[in-house]
Image (cartoon, rainbow, N blue to C red):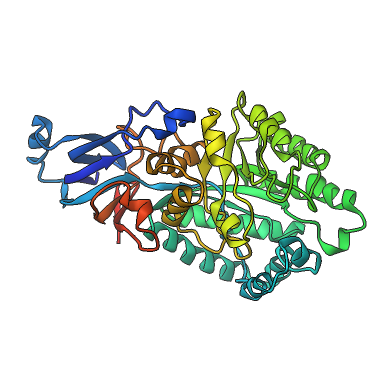
Amino acid sequence: MSKILIKNIKELVGIDDGKRLLAKGKEMGKLETQKNAWLFISDEKIAAFGTMNDKKYMDLTKDDSAEIIDASGKMVFPSFVDSHTHLVYPASREIEYVDKIKGLSYEEIAKRGGGILNSARKMQEMPEDELYESALKRLDEIIAHGTGAVEIKSGYGLSVESELKMLRVIRRLKEASPLIIKATFLGAHALPLEYRQNRKAYIDLVVNEMLPRVAEEHLADYIDVFCDKGFFTPQETARILEAGLQYGLRGKIHANELDFSGGIQTGVNYNALSVDHLEYTGEEEIEALLPSDTMPTILPGAAFFLNMRYAPARKMIDAGLPVAMASDFNPGSSPSGNMQLILSMASILYRLTPQEAVNATTINTAYAMEISDETGSIAVGKRANLFITKEIPTIEFIPYYYGVNKVNEVILNGKRIK
């Protein structure tokens, strides 16, 4: 049984009683902390924490089996949870990035066979082992920046065998990585060129061929659909979500990135775990979300990279909604899985306070992966997934001092990651 005692913590951030599953509305601005603190880890879990003058701390120092970490001048945060990524992909797409600089839109690039379809062609050619090795390196990248849990989607396959290949790679990553990983089946990411004149045939393929194979091999935790202008309609989305529910797969929907698509309402109607992107969110969408259990998830990296409008995060929070913020790490529209950058964008671009931004990238994204009972905050009994910062003056310094990795050390499952 491994034990770690972290002492002299300048500030222990994001503490709670472990019963809180998300933060919404005004609650998002509340971030409990403890100064001059210690934290004790035992058997992969957070076992106890308190202030340095506690008698319990003095008793723990007598335990010779515990590894001691001195965090003087440093803070401890719960690990980031990144609830929306596409980080299993065959190749980068920097040439399309130049097309964007020259003025081509996301939709125009897609219509030319670029974008998702570009990745799909390369996906069919890449061997599974090579795909796995490249994704494993990306996981190491995000761990180094403080991420402790990640959702990974398929969707660059767009054929039965390629979608299965992606999901098998994600299963291998689950087995190899210390991260908590959830897999999402996104066969309905785009229409392949050969189905452009027969949409129903492709949806039939997703529902009748891909989905049964995915379920048979237990390859996915969730199902996703790109419900938006130029992609899949609410009616098509509903059919795919219904099929997924028959196999026990709850929805996580790409919605309202390009227009008021009806994707948010469709997600709510089918009790989706989250609806993601949300650049086009108005009063009707907010009203639909308020009584639901669906987590509104904003992807700042994509809106920033594509020069799109920003989702009305401030309006959503002020209306009483929870908001999560994830990276959308992918080769076409958000080539970064750095959640510290997402935290900064939450404050700089979306006007969230640093406290709201921390909640948006930890406990709320954990909810969007159904793991907020085991991670996303510092609580006794939760998994010991956390990071120790470098010496920093305040919590506010984390979003303020953007572009620099402020993580000094990562602990996942109660073990130090070298």
On the picture, is 300 further left or further right than 257?
left
Pick the front one: 313 or 221: 313
Residue visible at 47% across and 45% down in the picture: 351
In this image, 200 relative to 264: left or right? right
Relative image position of residue 223 (x, y in whole percent): 67, 43
Going by the picture, which residue comes out furthest to the right? Answer: 197
Q: Relative to 270, does residue 183 appear above or below in the rendering?
A: below
Q: Quadrant of residue 383?
A: top left
* Residue 18: image location, x then y, percent: 36, 29
Looking at the image, residue 64 lies above or below residue 373: below
Q: Residue 193: give x, y in percent of width and height.
A: 84, 64
Q: Nearer the viewer, residue 415 or 296?
A: 296
Residue 88 visible: no
Q: Is residue 241 left or right of residue 150?
A: right
Q: Nearer the viewer, residue 287 or 96?
A: 287
Q: Which of 259 and 114 lies nearest the eye of the viewer?
A: 259
Res 317 visible: yes
Image quadrant in which the C terminus is located: bottom left
User: In the image, what residue occupies the spot 52% across and 53% down?
Assistant: 327
Going 69% across and 60% down the picture, which residue do you hit? Answer: 156
